[in-house]
Amino acid sequence: MAVLLVAVLLIAGLVLLKHFLAQRRLKNFPPGPPRLPLLGSLPFIPGSLIHLHAEEHWRRRYGPVVGLTTGSSQTLIVVCGAEEVLSILNQEHSQMRPAGTVKLRSFGKSLGLMFSDGAYWTEQRRFTLRELRDLGLGKSKLGDVILDEAEATLDAMERDGPAVEPNKLFNAPVLNVLWYMVSGRPFARPTAEGLDPKSQRLLHIMNKAMRNKRLATAPCDIWPVLRYIAPEWSGYNEIYPPIFEVQAFLRDEIKQQRSDDVHSSFMSKYCQEIDKAQPGSSFTEESLITTCLDLFMAGGESTANTLSFCLMYMAMYPDKQAKVHAELDAAGREPGDIVPLSDKARLPYLEATLAEVMRVNTIAPLAIPHRNSEDVEMNGYTIPKDSMILISLWSVLNDQKHWGDPEVFRPERFIDASGKYVKDPWMIQFGQGKRVCIGEAFAMQVAFSFFANLMNRFKYSLPAGAERPSTIPVAGFTVCPQDFTVIATRRK
Ligand code: HEM
């Protein structure tokens, strides 16, 4: 018993010593919630919607740069003031990703686009941007696939409506368009019997992979050994097996593309790079799988959730909705006609409404965690090298000084005196700088085409007697609206 007591005291003493030494090394560290031995600030970090907690509590108490630790020594910084956010996004040394972040999802290595950095990331990002542009963006075939998916969604709404649940509507069509972009082969159009079986399977496993709220902040990501000791509690069982299923799905498709001798898809172009790669090249099958996973994870839910929010705000603000409809009518479209992307210049209010939905509902409120490769000075504090930095894009999109009335849904803020849509440089929902979203143009093309067609075919209202839906989002990898229903009535 005495031996046990001595051992416990010894371990406790070592933990305290390690904590004390780690804290002493943090010179001029930004203020923030308490940092406890072993756990650091973890007990004070909310499980979700950290950006709202930062705005309501931390910023008032500690200022716009908040210092925390996870464990005794891993430093975590939350930047939640507009000016500080704009500064750090363009800070050369803050464009890395946290070392070791979620390597479990990429074969134990830093692969793909979202969580890698350095020379590997530069080469992969350049290749992906070039190929996606060459293969799809702005090309009429991609535009046709998008309109086809939009039309199929509208038909399904008409068939199953008038009451529709927007959170269930858009994941499948957006994923199908992403699939086309990556594989070069669209899924078969959905019928009354349902989705193409392959599309259905991809949707099912992606939904499972996306619905965890803790990727990168779960205990198993912070202390990887926990996956063996406490796979359930540490979040491992929730997060990783679905990701492994998506990897297996992608591996099968790569094999299929090789055997079908496909030449003109993102996957096949990537395979060509693998085939001519020298030893040590960044082009490998594991890398391709992780890049595809990144495109689905970063692109699917974010775009689908934006569309759900669009329907929510249209049902909540009938006066704004009427202006969108009036504009579509004035542009010469009959209700129910398909609206092509080329109509965009004639639909500034619709574009402004989409922008305002994206502003009030910042889909990725904390971007993707950054890391600084050197000590960085900010507001008189030092952000130590290799900190994980959470950057609140939300604080820029909701900044009182810049927007005046950020809490008000007002698409008119993007319309100038001559009635034209004007882009505001503070609209940084896709980030800014070196790490800016790779899929911005794609997301805007899909969101515009879907939104314009959703509006041209239907009018949206809340069900009779229903309460206004809550605008507090549900956190996931990106935020989505709480479940709600709207009535979609065909316009005459
Ligand atoms: C409304 C839709 C979308 C929003 C709001 C959005 C927003 C963002 C944000 C805020 C970041 C992080 C920037 C940073 O860390 O500083 C990001 C990164 C990324 N996004 Fe998007 N995104 C959207 C759609 C898409 C789509 C459709 C794709 C794929 C086609 C995509 C692919 C990526 C990738 C690969 C990254 C990582 C880039 C890197 O680290 O180099 N996103 N996105």
Image: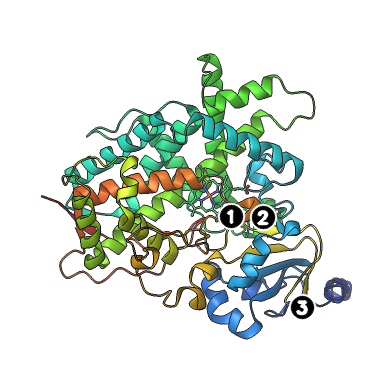
Nearest the eye: 406 or 183: 406
Q: Could you tell me how far apart the alpha carbons at marks 3 and 1 are, in whole angstroms?
A: 32 Å
- Badge count: 3
At which x and y percent is residue 320? 26, 65
Q: Could you tell me how far apart the alpha carbons at marks 1 and 2 are, in whole angstroms?
A: 8 Å
Please tell me which residue is depicted at 74% across the width and 57% down the height of the picture. 92
Residues at circles 1 and 2 in contact by the CB criterion of under 8 Å: yes
Please tell me which residue is depicted at 27% across the width and 37% down the height of the picture. 152
Q: Which residue is mark 3?
A: 380
Residue at the limit of the structure toward the front, as seen here: 418
Indicate the quadrant containing the N terminus: top left, top right, bottom left or bottom right.
bottom right
Q: Comparing marks 3 and 1, which lies closer to the viewer? A: 3
Q: What amino acid is at disc 2?
A: Asp
The numbered mark, 3 or 1, whose residue comes first in the sequence reads: 1
Disc 2 is placed on an element classified as helix
Disc 1 is placed on an element classified as loop
Q: Which residue is mark 1?
A: 215
Q: Which residue is mark 2?
A: 221
At which x and y percent is residue 86? 62, 65
